Amino acid sequence: MTTLLRGDPVRIAGEDFRVDAGPPPLADGAEVPVLVAALAPHLLRVAGQHAAGTIAWMANATAVEEHVAPRLRAAADAAGRPAPRIVAGLPVAVHDDVAEARAVAAELFAVYGTLPNYRRILERGRVTGPADAAVVGDEAGVAAQVEALFDAGATDVWAAPFAVGDDASASRARTRALLEELAASGAG
């Protein structure tokens, strides 16, 4: 894909695949960055060598700083590529009762605590499960946690708002309002 998106043709005649594709029509000078969803060391290396970066779901600030960023950047450096993007994706809820927000996150995102790749990234982040990785708290608390992701090496944050409390619409609106404010202020 990266070869095609650079504007070069791809011709492969392998045992399982045969590809003879010309580049897609792109506007002159257009670049299409390819980000690879990667959590484990091998795929982080592949992403650093061949892609514009990674998208790491459930990687908190500790996991980004100690696991994702060093491996991805080392691979990009070794391949002579520019510094890669690191998109840190986490559930986010602005809510005054942190315990309640974590309980909701535990229920909504429980499956990630059972899948081996996510289990490993949660362990690298030194948390027991998705609820502990979720970005929750009041406006100041969430803003600080988002800033910590950038300080850890994330270049982008993919916030997945979730509702907490009796008024789901108001809960999501409060979270979106803070995220919009952070984006407008150039947080990170």
Image (cartoon, rainbow, N blue to C red):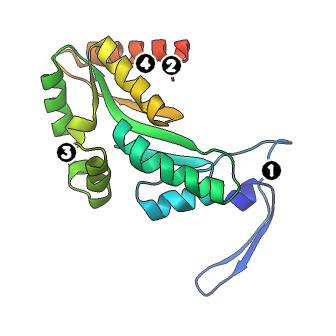
Q: Which quadrant holds residue 24?
A: bottom right
Q: Image check: 168 left or right of 8?
A: left
Label 3 element class: helix
Please state which of residues 99 and 71 is positioned toward the viewer in this rendering: 71
Which residue is the site of mark 1? 25
Q: Indicate which disc, 2 or 4, sits on the residue closer to the N terminus.
A: 4
Q: Position of residue 40 (x, y in %)?
A: 41, 59
Please say if 146 is above or below 181: below
Q: Residue at x 32, y 27 (%)?
A: 92
Kind of residue indicated by mark 2: Ala
Residue placed most toward the observer, 45 or 163: 45
Foreground of the two, 186 or 181: 186
Is the Cβ of the residue at disc 1 closer than 8 Å to that at disc 4?
A: no
Kindly identify which residue carries mark 4.
179
Compared with 46, 151 (above or below) is: above
Amino acid type, residue under disc 3 in the picture: Ala
Tell me which numbered mark, 3 or 1, is placed earlier along the sequence: 1
Mark 3 packing: few (<14 Cα in 10 Å), some, or many (20+)? some
Choose mark 2 or mark 3, whichever is in front.
2
Q: Secondary structure at mark 1?
A: loop
Which of the two marks, 2 or 4, is nearer to us in this view? 2
Q: Which mark is residue 110?
A: 3
Asked if residue 118 shows in the view, the reply is yes
With respect to residue 68, does 182 lie above or below?
A: above
Element under disc 4: helix
Decide which of tag 1 and tag 4 comes sooner along the chain. Answer: 1
Q: Residues within 10 Å of mark 2 (few under 14, many from 20)?
A: some
Residue 116 shown left or right of residue 51 in the figure: left
